Image: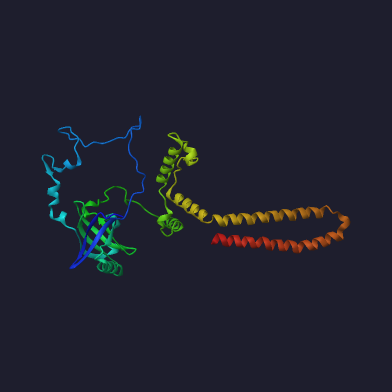
Amino acid sequence: MRAIWKGSITFGLVNVPISVYSATESHDLRMHQVHGKDGGRIRYQRRCEVCGEVVEWGEIDKAYDDGDRTVVLTDEELGELPTERSREIEILQFVPSDQVDPIMMSKTYYLAPASTSAKSYALLRRTLEETDRTAIVSFTLRQRTQLGALRVREDVMLLQTLLWEDEVREPDFAGMDSGVRISAKELEMASALVENFSGDFEPGDYTDEYQEQLRTLVEAKLEQGDTVDTEETFGEQEKGEEAEVLDLMEALRRSVSAAKEKKGGTSAKASTSSSGSRSSGSKASGSRSSGSKASGSSKASGDAKTAAQKKPAASSAKKSSATPRKRTASKKSA
């Protein structure tokens, strides 16, 4: 990893030299634009509207337009601003961690200690951990004064840039809670649905399906040329059915039912197997019964003995069939 900024954390008279590293990176497949006709690369040029010439980066300045006048600001002038020259991350306040609204969080950076600040870095990190506090800080990075949150994650201090209060928009749109009535039954069904989908969050369990399919397509085109068979590459795609209009209660009921079926798939298979064995057993007893009728009246005493033997057999069959029913019922209730 390469440090993008170096400075120090200041807290009263305490100074903690640190290096700043980007904590995140994009996994998106990088692509560029080309001319569809001949595959030529598309290039954008920085062209001046006054003289028509292509302008190099070193000759470009920034400007502010108020509608009537334009003020040009050079890199030298911007670099002379006091905050731009500051290399300090100043701790302004320590606040309870749950008071920092996630909507304000933006970019995340790792803070690593300099070789001379290992002890002061460890002290600040340990203090934040044991007090369960987040440090609100102010610093200047890339010509912007930033508000930030300093917290600890797995023995490393993180710096998360925060939006300013006026950068978070108010939810000004219709249809929030006006005239909406939620019944107790709807709330109960929704809670049951939440319970069926509950679990611990494991980031590794989720994948970016679009990027995976995009990489598959790129690899297939590299191997096969420009033309590929979509069905052969990605498999047969399911055709979407027309959406059925459902009321809220019916949608909740079906969702809960589907979630329960998904969880109880294994027990349902076991139940089907058990009922199948009972059915085959009853067919066998039926064949034995028809065989005893065919024996005739001349063997009455033998029939009586057979009937006497069948009675305990039948009762035992009832017991054996009753037992699986009890097990199946217990599985359903579970």
| The furthest residue to the top | 37
Coloring scheme used: rainbow
Residue 112 rendering spot, x and y as whole percentages: 28, 61
* 285 vs 262, nearest the viewer: 262
Q: Quadrant of the N terminus?
A: bottom left
Name the residue: 21% across, 37% down: 46
Would residue 27 be found to the left or right of residue 14 on screen? right
Residue 304 rendering spot, x and y as whole percentages: 83, 61
| The furthest residue to the right | 298
* 104 vs 194, nearest the viewer: 104
Relative height, residue 156 to residue 212 (above, below) = below
| Residue 324: quarter of image | bottom right
| Residue 96: quarter of image | bottom left
Would residue 136 be found to the left or right of residue 63 on screen? right
* 60 vs 260, nearest the viewer: 60
Relative height, residue 319 to residue 289 (above, below) = below
| The furthest residue to the front | 115
Name the residue: 65% across, 63% down: 323
Residue 190 rendering spot, x and y as whole percentages: 42, 55
Numbered circles on residues, count: 0
Q: Quadrant of the C terminus?
A: bottom right
| Residue 160: quarter of image | bottom left
Name the residue: 56% across, 59% down: 332
Would residue 171 be found to the left or right of residue 231 on screen? left
Residue 138 rendering spot, x and y as whole percentages: 20, 59
